[in-house]
Image (cartoon, helix red, strand yellow):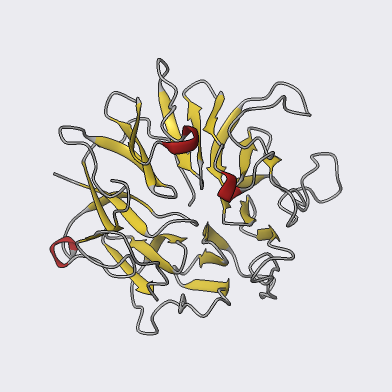
Amino acid sequence: MCVSSSAGQTAGTAICWGWDFNGECTPPSGQKFVKVSAGHRFSLGINSNNQIVHWGWTANGRGNIPSGDVFVQVSAGYDHGLALDATGNVYAWGGGDPNAGLGWDQGTVPSDPRGDSVYTQVSAGEAFNLVLRADGTIWHWGRDSEGQDDIPHNETGASGFVPYVAIDAGGHHGIGLRADGSIQVWGGQNYTCTTQGVLPSFPSDTPFIAVGAGHITSYAVKSDRSVVWWGGCNGCNTEPVNHIDIQHAFIDGGYGHAYARTASSHVYAWGSPCTPGGGTLVFAEPHEVPSFLANAVVLSAATGHSNHHNIVIIMD
């Protein structure tokens, strides 16, 4: 998901739907949120006081959230969290779940190999992180066995360098939007699906305005608000419905589903459930939207590449 700053944004009520294995679909009462993010069986939000709130599974450090600063972004991975404060500092925690693969250090913040930097956006993958620097380059750390660190055109001194302006980390790949409206994608190699990290051929004059990554899918919104997608070869139907006449403002992918927020601030979803049994279903399957949200004004939305639930913030 393309995460934007929470500064000056209206706070609202968090609504979740999908599976609720460990309380990840049960937001704490009495809280108003400006940002939310969905991880594997846990959820993160930034409340109206600009503090991080966790709900759901706490195992393997998922619940060890930082405090004391003014936070503007938060992103949940499989077993770890990533956050950005108002002065451009990055925080990470968790990362101890063996199911995510140990030894990738996704829950700690190493030294940036390019020295001290101011950061503008963060996005947590399954066991890796992507961080956008103020100079338009991307910093990766964590898992790299599927090419998550093979970020194209990422050197400011290179001929034809165009700064990145938005990033999103999927399950095993990354996608980025550049200042000229072009997109780049990387990673996903040697995994179940190897096409999510391979950029399709688009007309050279096709400008994009937003990007999103699911577990094994990539999405991009064109300037005419239509959507292109690729990947998704695990048998789950993640292709947007054909009758779309909606102006897309945001799009993102989950594990086997996806959803979008429209320019009129409504939300819809599609795909195949592709979810394991054993969890408590809240409201609706993650590829469906609860009927009472049909006319809700959605302020912000989140799904996650390694989870089976969605979160939206609605205007009260």
Given residues 159 and 250, the one toward you in this image is: 250
Q: How many marks?
A: 0
Is residue 238 in sight in this rendering?
yes
Q: Is residue 166 above or below residue 253?
A: above
Residue at 78% from the left image edge and 51% from the top image edge: 153
125 to the left or right of 155: left
Position in image of residue 207 (x %, y %): 59, 64
240 to the left or right of 232: left
Residue at 45% from the left image edge and 79% from the top image edge: 237
Given residues 156 and 75, the one toward you in this image is: 75
Say which quarter of the image contains residue 246: bottom left
Position in image of residue 63 (x %, y %): 41, 32
Given residues 193 and 159, the one toward you in this image is: 193
Position in image of residue 234 (x %, y %): 55, 76
Position in image of residue 155 (x %, y %): 81, 42
Is residue 126 in sight in this rendering?
no
Given residues 156 and 55, the one toward you in this image is: 55
Residue at 38% from the left image edge and 65% from the top image edge: 259
Q: Is residue 163 above or below residue 295?
A: above
